[in-house]
Amino acid sequence: MTPFLVIQAIVIGLAVIASLIYACRRLMPATSQRWQATLADSLSMDSRPTVVRAIGKRLQPVAAAGGCGSGCGSCSTRCGSESAAAEQPVQFLERSGE
C-alpha cells in the first residue's frame, strides 16, 4: 500500500466515525448521553492517570435543567407548551380561472 492509500483510508474512516457519532446524537439523544456518561465515569476513576481523569471529567454530559418554564415538555403539566404553534385548520382556496 502506498502512503496515499493509508492516509485516504484513515481520513475516510474518521469521516465515517464522525458521521456515526453525529447520527447517534441526533437520533438517539438519551442513549448517546447514557453511553457518554458511562465512558466519562470509567475514565474519571481514581485509579486512572490525571490526564485521563481530566478527559473523563470533560466528557461528563451536562445535566438537563428541567423545571416549569424550561420548555422541555416532558411532564404532564404541559408548562412548556405555550411556545408551541396553535392548531389552525387547513383552508383550500379556488384557483382563479385564467
Image (tube, helix red, strand yellow):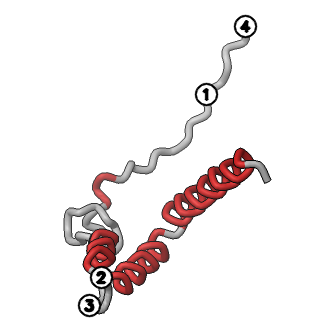
Residue ID for mark 1: 93
Q: Residue at x 76, y 49 (%)?
A: 2
Q: Position of residue 87 (x, y in %)?
A: 44, 50
Q: Quadrant of the C terminus?
A: top right
The numbered mark, 4 or 2, whose residue comes first in the sequence reads 2
Q: Position of residue 17 (x, y in %)?
A: 59, 61
Q: Left or right? Give the position of 11 relative to 40.
A: right
| Res 37 → quadrant | bottom left
Q: Residue at x 53, y 58 (%)?
A: 22
Marks 3/2: CA–CA distance: 8 Å
The numbered mark, 1 or 4, whose residue comes first in the sequence reads 1
Front label number (4 vs 3): 3
Q: Residue at x 36, y 79 (%)?
A: 40
Q: Amino acid at mark 3?
A: Asp
Marks 4/2: CA–CA distance: 78 Å
Which label belongs to residue 98? 4
Q: Amino acid at mark 1?
A: Leu
Which label belongs to residue 49? 2
